[in-house]
Image (cartoon, rainbow, N blue to C red):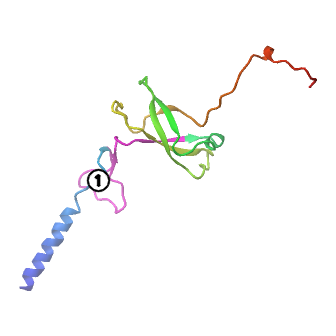
Amino acid sequence: KASYQAALAAADVARKALADTVLRSPISGQVAQRLVQNGERVAVEARILEVVDLSRLELEALLGPADSVAVRVGQKAHLTIEGRAEPLQATVVRISPSAQPGSRTVPVYLAIDPTPDMPALRQGLFVQGLLDVGRAEQLAVPLDAVRTDKPQ
């Protein structure tokens, strides 16, 4: 009876070891990069695969210190991708609390707003964009229309 119990325990250990050989991603997406090959031995914290979820893309924009002061979470940005005429909409979701030491730029993270006709975007693309930080309406008149009666 003890031998039978030991064999059952060994079978459970073998099943657990076999289950540990299967990789499951915590997110649904596509494999962007395969860093190891089948049969390779890897360390516990080693990177094996890079999985990207293309349905939820986020981009990092590096802003100068002067430009970053006016940026707030929730502001809208208009992004242009090379080869696409219509701009994409994005929203500021996070702002880094500190500037990067070497360049003194502040990382700002924008989530691309999904649309039904969203193009096939890929990780690593470069985009150009405009971020609305404020608007001002002022009356503008030609300089010769201004009259000064008093001395300066």
Q: Is residue 11 left or right of residue 86?
A: left
The x and y percentages for residue 140 are 71, 21
Does 85 appear in magenta? no
Q: Which residue is tagged 1?
A: 25
The residue sitting at 29% across, 48% down in the picture is 28
Along the line of sight, the residue nearer the viewer: 13 or 94: 94
Q: Quadrant of residue 32?
A: top left
Which image quarter holds the C terminus? top right
Main SS of the magenta part reads loop
Residue drawn where x is 65% and y is 31% of the image: 136
Can you name the residue that lies furthest to the front here? 149
Answer with left or right where residue 110 lies relative to residue 149: left
Q: Is residue 61 above or below residue 39?
A: above
82 or 132, nearer to the observer: 132
Between residues 44 and 51, which one lies in front from this camera angle?
A: 51
On screen, 122 above or below 151?
Answer: below
Q: Give the amino acid type for the residue marked by disc 1 in the picture.
A: Ser
Which x, y percent locates residue 37? 27, 50
Farthest right residue? Answer: 151
The answer to which of 110 and 106 lies nearer the viewer is 110
> Who's the residue at 32% across and 53% down the image?
48
The quadrant holding residue 132 is top right
Query: Does residue 140 appear to the left or right of 78 in the view shown?
Result: right
**Over which residues does the magenta segment extend?**
32-61
Image coordinates of residue 142 in percent, x first then y, are 75, 16
Where 14 falls versus 35 (above or below)?
A: below
Find residue 135 and report its image quarter.
Answer: top right
| Percent x, y of residue 45 | 37, 61
**SS of the residue under disc 1:** loop
**Number of residue marks:** 1
